[in-house]
Amino acid sequence: MGRALSHLAWLEAEAIHIIREATAEADNPVMLFSAGKDSTVLAHLALRAFYPSKPPFPLLHIDSTWEFRSLIEFRDDFARRHGFELIAHANEEGRAAGLNPFDYGDRYTLLMRTEPLKGALDRGKYDVIFGGARRDEERSRAKERIVSVRENNHVWDPRHQRPEFWRQFNLRLGCGQSARVFPLSNWTEQDIWVYAMQKEIELAPLYFSQLRRVVRRKEALVVVDDEARMRFQPGDEIEMRRVRFRTLGCWPVTGAIESEATDIASVLDETLDARVSERQGRISDGEDGGSLEQKKREGYF
C-alpha cells in the first residue's frame, strides 16, 4: 500500500493536476504574474507541472505604473532565470493623464488594473487565465470556484457558477466566455510560506524585514518608494522603521507591518501568530466603499 500524501504534498499534486488539465483544455492559456508570493509559488508549480519542458504559456503582468520598484526588478529577474516569456501591460493613456491612487481611489483601480487586464486578455485572445488567488484571503474569493467562468467583457456573476465535484472541472466555454483558473484555491497563507521554505523558492525582498522609509496613514505604515511622486500630507514625517509586507499592491495604498522577520522561517512564525487578515494591508480595498467582490464582478483579478 502506498504511503498517504502529506497535506502539502496533496495540495501540490492538486495544483499541478489543475494546471495540466486546464492547459490541455485551453486554446491559448496565460498565467497572471504579479511577482507576489502566491503568483511566484504558482509559477514554480507550473515549472514542476511541465518539467523538463517549459510551461506552454507566458506570464502576464498588469503594471499599474505604481508598482514597487524592487518588485519590477524581481519580476524581470524571475522570468529571465526560469525562461518564461513575460508580457507586461499598462494603461499608457492613464499614465500620461496622471491617474494615481491618491486622487482617484477605486476609479484608479478600475482604469489602471481592471481595464488594462481585460484589454490585455482580449488582445492576446486568451481563453484560460491562471491566477494565484486563494479562498482564505477574502470573502468574495472564498465563494469563487477553482474554475471561474467569466462572461462577455470578463464579468463574473457569483450566482451562475458551475458545480465542482471532487476533482472534476468543467472547462467547456461558450462564445465570448473565458475561464479564470485558481490552482491555489485550497491553500492558505501558511501553506504558501511552508511550501516556499520546503522548496527553497526565492520570494520578493519586500516580504522580509528591512529598514525602510515610511509615513503613517491612519493605522497603516506606507513605504515611501518614490519620494518625487509621494503625496505628503501636513505633518508627515518620514521615519526609518524595520518593516515588511504580508501582501503587495500599489505602494501608496499598501500598508507595511513592523517586523524583525528576515527569512522565511521567521516570517512563518509571525504568520502563525497573526490575528488579522493579510489583506488588512490593502488600504485600497475599503476606499470609496468599493468591495473586492464588486471589483471582481467588473473583471478584476
Image (spheres, rainbow, N blue to C red):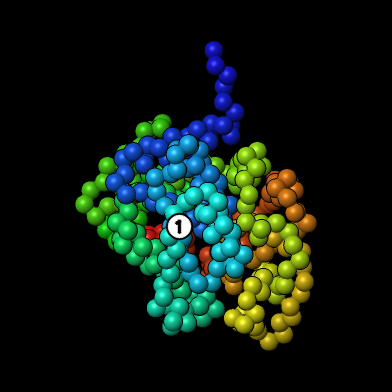
Residue 29 placed where, x, y %? Answer: 36, 49
User: In the displayed structure, does residue 205 sit left or right of residue 185?
Assistant: right
Residue 289 placed where, x, y %? Answer: 49, 69
Residue 187 placed where, x, y %? Answer: 54, 42
Residue at the image position 39 percent from the left and 63 percent from the top:
117
Residue wearing tag 1:
86
For the view shown, which residue lies furthest in the left direction?
Answer: 175
Q: Is residue 27 above or below residue 291?
A: above
| Local secondary structure at mark 1 | strand
Residue 271 placed where, x, y %? Answer: 68, 49
Q: 123 or 83, which is in the foreground? A: 83
Q: 255 or 241, which is in the foreground? A: 241
* Residue 176 appears in the rendering: yes
Corner quadrant of residue 233? bottom right
Residue at the image position 67 percent from the left and 64 percent from the top:
256
Q: Residues within 10 Å of mark 1 (few under 14, many from 20)?
A: some
User: In the displayed structure, does residue 20 sit left or right of residue 43?
Assistant: left
